[in-house]
Image: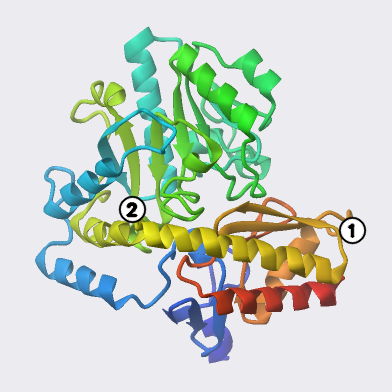
């Protein structure tokens, strides 16, 4: 009875009926209270990019906790300033000529996106006056569950229970240039887009669509927000995945791996927006605290390393090859999506629907492999960036043995 309770504790109704109680991790593996070990190719939903059991980061956290954990937004601290300077010094994606001037720290990706949307409306009101408050997003996008971010998240399952959402929000089909040209104008404050849709089936905007989007945003002085909460910080083989798809964002939002598992997000702000900000317009109690930013500063140095980015690109190609080879070995139609070490696997046969995809995720967990879903029918792999070639191959073998049994 005790074992059953420990591994299937009573949970609030918003969670699954049962949930494993995880106990500790090391490298790319995590174990539950029963001592069962799992190879983690989900990274805590793309958070644990540096893996588990990092004594270097634990030491930094412990040292900072002995000095100062929290001061509120009434003051600042050395770790917050140091991290902000590093982020600004890194500059924008390589296609962009914009330079960031300030960073707003928050707690989560949703909060970062909410902040970016507020700043976009502030900018539009300051530049053009009231009535230019439209917010544009795209099908398949996921930007968070706060009311503003949810209003621009396409999935009806998430949206409808909380309707009506905020006014002025429009969602267009991704990669539909005609719809984009017919909709976007000076009455919009911002467009928000993921360089690759982490929750929406691992799709990314195509080159022509991105070019049109960049051009229209410049033409109408509409802020382009790149939601890099999941795709950024090296996940796709560049510091920002915007570089890989050609986006030229005015604002970038970051989250997930920024503080190696501690809650921290960031909004990267250009000078043209920063000049409209004043004390008290927006704030956060816990965002940018000394503990999280001390750990994040060290994490930033580790992730923003050209050698690591080169390895992520190489291992991303390896992962793509392993998935394609697995499909070929089974003789079933499918496609591999994604960039770097954010990959998706979709089977094209109509019999493999969303319920099948969910079953594969469950069976993989039973077999000691953690994978994720993306959208209705795509298996998502987002392993720690430090995962070895052998571990990637091990994960591929487990996954395709499960798929083989299921077909």
Q: Nearer the viewer, residue 18 or 364?
A: 364
Look at the picture and state if 108 lies above or below 119.
Answer: below
Q: Residue at x 40, y 29 (%)?
A: 250
Q: Is residue 253 left or right of residue 301?
A: right
Q: Is residue 135 visible?
A: no
- All told, the count of numbered labels is 2
| Quadrant (top left, top right, bottom left, bottom right) of the C terminus | bottom right
Badge 1 density bin: few <14, some 14–19, many ≥20, Cα 10 Å: few
Numbered label attached to residue 222:
none
Q: Position of residue 384 (x, y in %)?
A: 48, 67
User: Which residue is label 2 attached to?
Assistant: 264
Element type at marker 1?
loop
Q: Nearer the viewer, residue 192 or 19?
A: 192
User: Which residue is label 1 attached to?
Assistant: 351
Q: Residue at x 72, y 75 (%)?
A: 363
Q: Separation of disc 2 and disc 1 at Cα?
A: 41 Å
Mark 2 touches mark 1? (CB < 8 Å): no
Sequence-first tag of 2 and 1: 2
| Quadrant (top left, top right, bottom left, bottom right) of the N terminus | bottom right
């Amino acid at each position: 009875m005790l074992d059953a309770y420990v591994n299937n504790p009573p949970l609030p109704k918003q969670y699954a009926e049962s949930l494993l109680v995880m106990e500790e991790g090391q490298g790319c593996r995590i174990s539950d209270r029963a001592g069962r070990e799992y190879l983690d190719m989900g990274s805590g939903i793309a958070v644990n990019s540096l893996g588990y059991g990092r004594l270097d980061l634990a030491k930094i956290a412990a040292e900072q906790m002995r000095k100062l954990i929290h001061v509120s937004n009434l003051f600042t601290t050395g770790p917050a300033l140091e991290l902000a300077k590093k982020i600004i010094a890194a500059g924008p994606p390589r296609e962009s000529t914009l330079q960031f001037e300030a960073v707003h720290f928050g707690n989560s990706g949703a909060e970062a996106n909410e902040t970016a949307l507020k700043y976009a409306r502030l900018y539009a009101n300051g530049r053009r006056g009231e009535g230019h408050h439209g917010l544009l997003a795209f099908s398949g996008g996921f930007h968070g569950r706060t009311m503003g971010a949810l209003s621009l998240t396409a999935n009806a399952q998430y949206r409808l229970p909380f309707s009506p959402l905020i006014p002025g929000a429009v969602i267009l089909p991704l990669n539909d240039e005609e719809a984009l040209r017919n909709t976007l104008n000076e009455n919009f404050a911002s467009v928000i887009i993921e360089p690759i849709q982490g929750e929406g089936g691992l799709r990314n905007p195509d080159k022509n669509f991105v070019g049109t989007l960049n051009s229209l945003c410049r033409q109408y002085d509409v802020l382009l927000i790149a939601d890099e909460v999941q795709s950024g910080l090296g996940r796709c083989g560049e510091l920002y995945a915007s570089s890989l798809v050609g986006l030229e964002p005015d604002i970038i939002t970051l989250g997930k791996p920024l503080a190696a598992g501690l809650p921290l997000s960031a909004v990267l702000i250009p000078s043209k927006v920063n000049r409209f900000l004043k004390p008290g317009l927006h704030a956060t109690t816990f965002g940018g605290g000394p503990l999280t930013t001390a750990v994040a500063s060290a994490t930033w140095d580790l992730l923003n390393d050209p050698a690591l980015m080169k390895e992520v690109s190489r291992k991303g190609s390896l992962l793509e090859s392993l998935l394609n080879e697995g499909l070929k070995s089974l003789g079933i139609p499918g496609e591999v999506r994604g960039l770097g070490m954010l990959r998706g696997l979709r089977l094209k046969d109509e019999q493999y629907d969303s319920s099948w995809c969910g079953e594969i995720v469950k069976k993989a967990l039973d077999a000691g492999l953690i994978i994720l879903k993306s959208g209705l029918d795509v298996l998502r792999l987002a392993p720690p960036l430090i995962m070895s070639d052998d571990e990637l191959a091990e994960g591929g073998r487990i996954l395709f043995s499960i798929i083989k049994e299921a077909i």
